[in-house]
Image (spheres, rainbow, N blue to C red):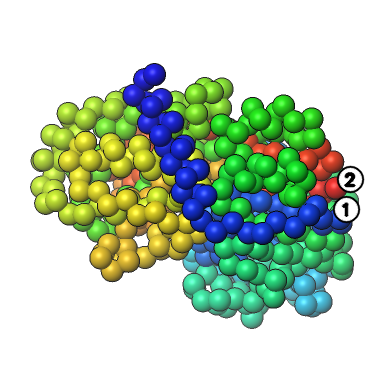
Amino acid sequence: MTAGSNRATLGRRAVLGAGAALAAPRLAGAAGRDTLVFAPVSDLTGTDPFFGASDITSHHVGLVFETLFGMDETLTPRPQLLEGATIEDDGRRWRLVIRKDSRFHDGEPVRAVDAVASLRAWGGLDVFGGKLMAVTDALEAVSDRELQFRLKKPFPLLAHALAKPATVHPAILPERVARIAGSGKPIEVIGSGPYRYLPDERVVGARVAYARFDRYVPRTEPPSYMAGARVPYLARVEWNVIPDPATATASLQKGEIDWLHDLPPDLAPLLRRDPGVVVQVQDFIGGEIFMRMNCMQPPFDNAEARRAVLVAIDQASFMQAAIGDDTSLWRVPVGVWSLGKPMSTDAGVGVMAGDIAKAKALLGQSGYKGEKVVLLQAVDYPMLSAASEVAADMLRRIGFNVDMVPLSYAVANQRRNNRNPPDQGGWGIALGPFNGYNRYDPAAHLGISETFSGWPKIPEIVALREQWFDAPDLAGRQEIARAIQLAVWRDVPYIPLGSYSPLTAFRKGITGVMRGGATFFNVKKA
């Protein structure tokens, strides 16, 4: 057995042990045909579509909220909450008309003023939205159902921005809710999507519930990822949080739950042998595990300390620990962009050489004073917990003073928003998952964002991203994406640890499960 595989085995055993120590919910028997019971990888980390960055929140957003455009499987934006759109004045004016049958969950119609307030709030928080707002002269409601963008110059990616299927979502909220959304304050969770959030049934750490919005009118086009028909066939969707993967797997086999969203690869062979269960790859773009360092606090406010970590990275060790020995489920080396997609490049990836000796030398040159590095370990998220064990071992071998703090994924995400020093509730390093779209291109990539937790200030990357938006063609955008990747290796706003194919599993009687994420519309239960 190799050193890497030994760490992988120990890491996965640690996950199961940690998960079993957490309180597991009491499971009821199989629900009826109108209720789907879903086991997310962790508890819901936030209900505000503009606040918090996790796939768990994205699943919630897809149930409750809608966007003006929806992204189809080819990543082409299609009208979603819109009846239609027209482009005038050589691309400087976009007129958007909201569907007349769209309503919020309180029964009120979705109005142009709601969309305007929502997009303004979103644009102040999202990189893609911020770029759109920077080229907007005016965003205004023309009538109850029509809004318009008047632009300083053409912005061909406007529909792509408004269809963004990942953090931060350009969701449409009632005007009164949009005024405080994204602030971190509690909001009234009300959207225009196919399901309603049920706050009275929320049990933190155990349960989330949704009910079909009976006044929702689906589009008539065939469904394709986040575009087209979103039919709420189910009367209810219940999330049952089960921290231990083995318990969740057994519950799926017994029919106590219908859908296990994140299936640890170690348990996949067991479920593949079960004739009552379907196992499939969920994200058609491909996921990624990332390492994010807090650039606001020592020692990682110094780029030299961050580079010391970068050169010590052995992506295969992280993937083996997190995903397992089945190399068909993970790929290395991985650069900044989604593998096999237009921006992907291998420029400079060899810098991640697993070179501990060089890392020690760089750390010594950085002036590191032995500051404690708080590493957040999401113990209820198996692949992140195992990868965190590898990270802690690597950091200690380099010479860092590491304090690994075990937390639930939900709490770790909340703590990642804390900008204070570690002794005041802050942090130093955290690992997390990116879905394929969150690293697809410079418009969507959270890892290079200065507003994503970690808060790096790298003016060259910001400038290159601006140039990417203005590039005249694909070749120009690809060249800029390559330059961004090289800048990432130099200043290290984040580190990619490898690409993987996330697995999901559900009972054979469940149909309509689309690839790309946990979407519950169009899902039926036999």
Residue 71 screen position, x and y as percent: 69, 47
Q: For mark 2, give the secondary structure.
A: loop
Using the image as rendered, state which of residue 486 and residue 274 is in the foreground: 274
Three-letter code, disc 2: Ala
Residue 222 screen position, x and y as percent: 84, 44
Using the image as rendered, state which of residue 358 and residue 108 is in the foreground: 358
Q: Going 67% across and 63% down the picture, which residue do you hit?
A: 208
**Image quadrant where residue 428 sits:** bottom left
Label ID, residue 526:
2
Q: CA distance from mark 2 to mark 1?
A: 6 Å
Which residue was labeled with disc 1?
Answer: 33
Residue contact at pointers 2 and 1, CB within 8 angstroms: yes
Q: How many marks?
A: 2
Q: Going 38% across and 27% down the picture, which residue do you hit?
A: 6
Label ID, residue 208:
none
Residue 432 screen position, x and y as percent: 45, 47
Three-letter code, disc 1: Arg
